[in-house]
Image (cartoon, rainbow, N blue to C red):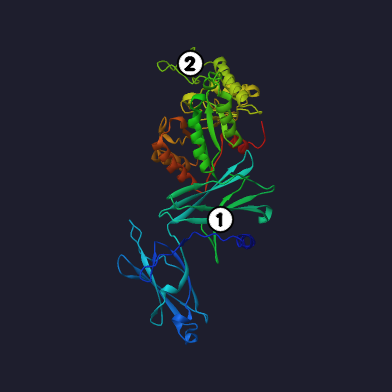
C-alpha cells in the first residue's frame, strides 16, 4: 500500500486541483465567509503597517478571528506568525462552526497584530466549501473492455468547483500500469451536476482499477474514498441488470432519451427488449434505417444489449389458458411450434436489421410469461435462436426453468431475482424499488433484474429514477451488467 501511495503522489503532484471560492468582498475591513470547512488566507503586512521598527514584529503572532454575523459570537480564533518580510499564511479547518440548517451563515474575518487591525493586508484567500461533495461513479463495459468515470457533484450553494478525477490501473503485485487524469470544472450555476468522461481503454494485464478525486494544492488530500473495480472479479458485487421492455420503431426516441439519461451517469450496460412486429411492420418508413436503425446501432456500439421481447406481444385478455390463438402470443400457453416461430421471427428481424454480425442472446417474454415448453424450445434450438439467458422467466410459472426434480435448468439460464424499478407498468417508484432491492440483498441474491418501460416515463418518473440511480451508485458493491455480460462472466467457457 505504501508503494501505491507514493506512486500516486508522484502523479498527483503535477495537478493543482482544488474545490475553491475566492473571497473578495470587503465590508468594514472584514471578509464575508459563507459556510465552509477549510480556510486558506495569505497576506503581507508592509512597512506602512509595521512602521520603522517592523523588525520588532518578526515571528510575532497575527490573530485571526471569525465572528458569526447572525449571533455576534466569536466562533473561531486562529493565530500564525509573520516572517521578517511581513508575510503570513492561515490554513485551517473549522468544522466546529455552527451554522443555520436553512440558510448560509456569514462570518466576518478580522486580523489583529499587537492591537492593530491588519485585515486589509490580505492578498489572497480561498474557502473549501463543506457543502460541495463529490461521489465517484465508475462503470465497466466488459463488451469493449473500457471503463467510464462520472462524478456526482452536490453543490448546495452553487460554488464554482475545480477538481481532477483519476483513473489508476494496477497489474500484478500492485504494479502501476497507467494513470488517466481528467480535469473538470463546474460553473456553480446548478446545485447538482452529472459529468461524464469518455470511455478509457483498460491496459493489458490490469487486475485493479482505482477511481479517485484529489485536492492538490500544497497538501495532497483525497476528496473521496477511492472506488475500486476488479475487471475479472465480480463475485462480491451486487450485479444490477436494467431490463427496459417494448422497443420498436414507434417509441425509439423515448428509448434514446432513456439511453442518454443512463449514459450521463456513465451507465451504458443496459438492455432494451425489442418486439419483432414493432420493427418489421415499419420497414416501409423512409427513416426506418437512417434514423431508427442508426440510433439502435449507436446504442449497440456503446454497450447496450438489444434482447428479444417476443414477436407480437399481444394476448387475449379474456382467455390466457388456451394457446395458439391467431394474432396473439402468450408463451405460458402457446405450443412448441408457435413459440419457435415467434422467437425465430423476432430474433431474425433484430439480427438482420442491426447487422454487423449482431446476435440476440437474451429473451424476456411478454408479460414475463414462460412455460417448460419455452425452456425446451430455447435449449433445443440454440443453434438457430442463439439465446442463452432468460430474464424473469418464472414470474408466472414458478417451475418453468426447473426440471422434474426441482433443479434449475443449466441452459438456458434464468435470471429471476426481481427488483423492478416500477410499481406498475410505466410508473417509477423509488420506495418500492428500495424495498425490493434490500429484500433481495438480505436474502443473499446478488444478481438483480430491474424491469422498466422507458417509453412510458414522464418527468415525475425520471425524478424517481434519479433517486434510484443515486441510491445504486452510492453503494460501492453495486456494478452494472447486461444479461449477456453476466452470462459471459458466469460461464467463462462458451457453450
Image quarter hosting the C terminus? top right
Q: Which mark is residue 294?
A: none
Do tag 1 and tag 2 residues touch (Cβ < 8 Å)? no
Residue at (46, 30) in percent of width and height:
455
- Residue 376 vertical placement versus 72 (above, below): above
Q: Depth check: give the residue in front, 268 or 444.
A: 268
Circle 2: is it few (<14), some (14-19), or many (20+) Cα within 10 Å?
some
Q: How far from the left and from the top, in percent, is residue 356?
A: 66, 28
Q: How far from the left and from the top, in percent, is residue 480?
A: 54, 41
At mark 1, the secondary structure is strand
Badge 2 is on which residue? 328
Of discs 1 and 2, which sits in the foreground? 1
Q: Depth check: give the residue in front, 242 or 69.
A: 69
At mark 2, the secondary structure is loop
- Residue 414 vertical placement versus 10 (above, below): above
- Residue 18 vertical placement versus 263 (above, below): below
Q: Residue furthest front?
A: 48
Q: Depth check: give the residue in front, 98 or 64.
A: 64
Label located before the other in sequence (1 or 2): 1
Residue 224 in view here: no
- Residue 113 vertical placement versus 378 (above, below): below
Residue at (61, 48) in percent of width and height:
230
Circle 1: is it few (<14), some (14-19), or many (20+) Cα within 10 Å?
many
Counting every numbered tag in the picture gives 2
Q: Depth check: give the residue in front, 56 or 303.
A: 56
Q: Which mark is residue 164?
A: 1
Residue 331 in view here: yes
Measure the C-alpha gap from mark 1 to mark 2.
55 Å
Residue at (36, 66) in percent of width and height:
107
Q: How far from the left and from the top, in percent, is residue 459?
A: 40, 37
Q: Quadrant of residue 308?
A: top right
Q: How far from the left and from the top, in percent, is residue 130?
A: 43, 60
Amino acid at each position: 500500500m505504501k508503494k501505491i501511495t507514493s506512486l500516486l503522489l508522484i502523479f498527483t503532484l503535477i495537478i493543482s486541483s482544488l474545490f475553491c471560492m475566492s473571497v473578495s468582498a470587503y465590508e468594514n475591513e472584514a471578509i464575508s465567509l459563507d459556510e465552509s470547512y477549510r480556510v486558506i488566507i495569505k497576506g503581507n503586512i508592509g512597512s506602512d503597517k509595521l512602521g520603522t521598527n517592523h523588525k520588532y514584529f518578526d515571528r510575532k503572532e497575527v490573530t485571526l478571528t471569525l465572528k458569526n454575523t447572525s449571533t455576534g459570537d466569536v466562533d473561531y480564533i486562529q493565530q500564525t506568525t509573520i516572517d521578517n518580510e511581513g508575510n503570513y499564511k492561515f490554513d485551517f479547518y473549522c468544522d466546529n462552526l455552527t451554522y443555520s440548517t436553512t440558510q448560509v451563515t456569514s462570518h466576518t474575518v478580522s486580523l489583529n497584530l499587537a492591537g492593530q487591525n491588519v485585515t486589509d493586508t490580505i492578498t489572497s484567500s480561498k474557502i473549501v466549501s463543506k457543502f460541495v461533495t463529490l461521489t465517484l461513479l465508475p462503470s465497466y463495459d466488459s463488451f469493449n473492455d473500457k471503463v467510464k468515470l462520472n462524478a456526482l457533484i452536490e453543490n448546495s450553494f452553487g460554488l464554482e468547483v475545480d477538481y481532477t478525477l483519476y483513473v489508476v490501473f494496477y497489474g500484478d503485485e500492485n504494479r502501476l500500469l497507467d494513470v488517466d487524469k481528467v480535469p473538470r470544472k463546474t460553473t456553480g450555476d446548478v446545485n447538482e451536476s452529472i459529468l461524464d468522461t469518455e470511455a478509457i481503454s483498460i491496459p493489458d494485464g490490469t487486475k485493479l482499477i482505482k477511481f479517485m478525486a484529489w485536492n492538490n494544492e500544497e497538501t495532497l488530500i483525497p476528496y473521496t474514498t477511492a472506488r475500486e473495480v476488479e475487471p475479472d472479479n465480480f463475485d462480491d458485487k451486487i450485479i444490477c441488470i436494467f431490463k427496459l421492455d417494448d422497443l420498436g420503431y414507434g417509441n425509439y426516441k423515448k428509448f434514446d432519451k432513456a439511453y442518454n439519461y443512463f449514459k450521463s451517469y456513465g451507465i451504458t450496460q443496459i438492455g432494451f427488449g425489442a418486439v419483432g412486429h414493432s420493427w418489421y411492420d415499419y420497414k416501409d418508413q423512409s427513416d426506418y434505417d437512417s434514423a431508427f436503425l442508426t440510433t439502435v446501432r449507436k446504442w449497440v456500439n456503446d454497450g447496450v444489449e438489444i434482447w428479444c421481447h417476443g414477436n407480437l406481444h399481444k394476448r387475449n385478455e379474456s382467455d390466457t389458458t388456451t394457446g395458439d390463438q391467431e394474432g396473439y402470443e402468450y408463451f405460458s400457453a402457446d405450443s412448441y411450434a408457435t413459440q419457435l416461430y415467434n422467437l425465430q421471427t423476432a430474433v431474425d428481424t433484430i439480427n438482420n436489421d442491426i447487422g454487423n454480425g449482431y446476435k440476440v442472446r437474451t429473451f424476456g417474454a411478454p408479460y414475463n410469461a414462460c412455460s417448460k415448453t419455452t425452456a425446451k424450445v430455447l435449449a433445443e434450438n440454440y443453434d438457430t435462436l442463439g439465446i442463452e439467458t432468460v430474464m424473469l422467466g418464472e414470474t408466472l410459472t414458478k417451475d418453468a426453468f426447473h426440471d422434474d426434480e426441482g433443479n434449475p435448468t443449466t441452459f438456458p439460464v434464468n435470471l429471476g431475482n426481481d427488483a423492478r424499478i416500477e410499481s406498475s407498468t410505466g410508473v417509477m417508484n423509488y420506495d418500492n424499488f428500495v424495498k425490493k432491492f434490500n429484500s433481495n440483498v438480505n436474502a443473499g441474491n446478488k444478481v438483480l433484474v430491474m424491469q422498466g418501460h422507458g417509453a412510458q416515463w414522464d418527468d415525475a418518473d425520471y425524478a424517481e429514477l434519479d433517486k434510484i440511480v443515486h441510491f445504486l451508485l452510492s453503494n460501492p458493491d453495486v456494478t452494472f451488467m447486461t444479461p449477456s455480460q453476466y452470462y459471459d462472466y458466469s460461464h467463462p467457457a462458451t457453450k
